[in-house]
Amino acid sequence: MKTYSKGHFRRNILLALGWNTIEFNQGVAEYAQKANWILNDMMCHNGRIPPHWNGNGIVTHINESDEKALISLIRRARVPVVNLGHYTSSAIDCRVIPNNAMIGASAAHHLLGRGFEHFGFFHVNSRPVVVERMGGFSKSVLAAKKQFFDLNYESKIPASLQNEIQYARMLRWLSSQLRKLPKPVGVMAQYDAEANDVVRACLMSNLRIPEDVAVIGVDNDPVYSTLGLMPLTSVDSNRRLAGYRAAETLDQILDGERWPEKTIRINPGGVVVRASTDLVAVEDIHISKALRFIWKRFKDEITLEDIIKASGISRRALYRRFEKIVGHPINKELMNRRLEHAKELLRGTEKKLQFIADESGFGHAQRLSKAFKHFCGTTPLSYRREHQHSKPEKSIET
């Protein structure tokens, strides 16, 4: 990171999102503070384009060509622009967008790990972000030889869903579709808002969540995912990191450094599990017992013998049936639980590696580092740096 002496020229940057998305704002603001920018974010609060702004660069969020006011602004400004949305044009120098295929795959793997055989994806449009998410989801489901259903309401929309009549019509349609699906079924929605629509449609049909329909959204929005009708499992799309990376990229462009890639993809931060998927959708009672034991006790120093004992069947029967139903061996399930928890701690805390190893069931920092290198292809320190660009880069390897 560059440093600035007192009185150094300060870049004047406009954050032109058109609305207030707190995670984007936080990520951009964290980089702006380090780079000593003058950051104008009033547009995020009042939605109005500053009439006389004259600065050095813009971080924006444009998804569609019909966002004419923002597009007109960036063309008139004639300064470097980094876009947090999918729209691209000659006025856009770089896009920093989610790895939507990986987001979809993460949701599928979460539901697959819980033993589901049937899967649905609910969406109300076919924008690139939605197509990519559904593609990653369906590809993972079909690769596991499971059943996939496209719950597409787009062709049924004669008017905006903001219309209360149309919204009620959509819920009735979705409720009807969910009743027809084989149960239990895991359903992903394009965003957390639509995931809450799935929850409402289930309640209309007296479908149990998660026993009949498990629901997962995207963005881990603090309102939709925790304050809705039910605590909602969600894929963290890493919007804070995206904001930070967009600001960092804009600074590189302004410095005349090596030109960044035209599109930078931000990998998801993991799946945040809540009540809407918190079950084992496995009919085999012995495999269900084994999974629940692993999920509950993975932080402890459990062995394969402990898992076999908890399942209530022989070693040979458990090994054979577990891999057939879950899709991978028992030891991989245990390792996955431990690594996912370690990743969560690396992303969300500054705890030392030994603490994370203890909390994740590895026991020793070296054992965690070895597992990370083998299964993730990187080190815990590198993973933390990748997912905490806005955090101090201090060593956790010892």
Image: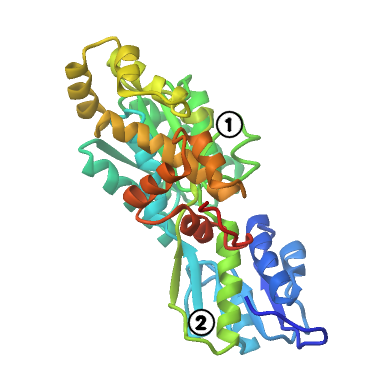
| Residue 253 visible in this rendered orientation of the protein | yes
Q: Nearer the viewer, residue 1 or 290?
A: 1
Q: Is residue 379 above or below residue 93?
A: above
Q: Earlier in the sequence, mark 2 or mark 1?
A: 2
Q: Could you tell me which secondary element the residue under label 2 belongs to? A: loop
Residue reaching furthest to the right: 7
Label 2 crowd (10 A; few <14 / some 14-19 / many >=20): many
Query: Which residue is pictured at 76% across the width and 62% down the height?
Result: 45
Provide the residue designation for mark 1.
Answer: 231
Q: Is residue 216 above or below residue 299?
A: below
Please state which amino acid type lies under the numbered disc 2: Asp
Please state which amino acid type lies under the numbered disc 1: Pro
Quadrant of the image occupied by residue 338: top left
Quadrant of the image occupied by residue 244: bottom right
Q: Residue 93: which disc?
A: 2
Q: Nearer the viewer, residue 377 or 45?
A: 377
Query: Which residue is pictured at 70% across the width and 66% down the height?
Result: 29
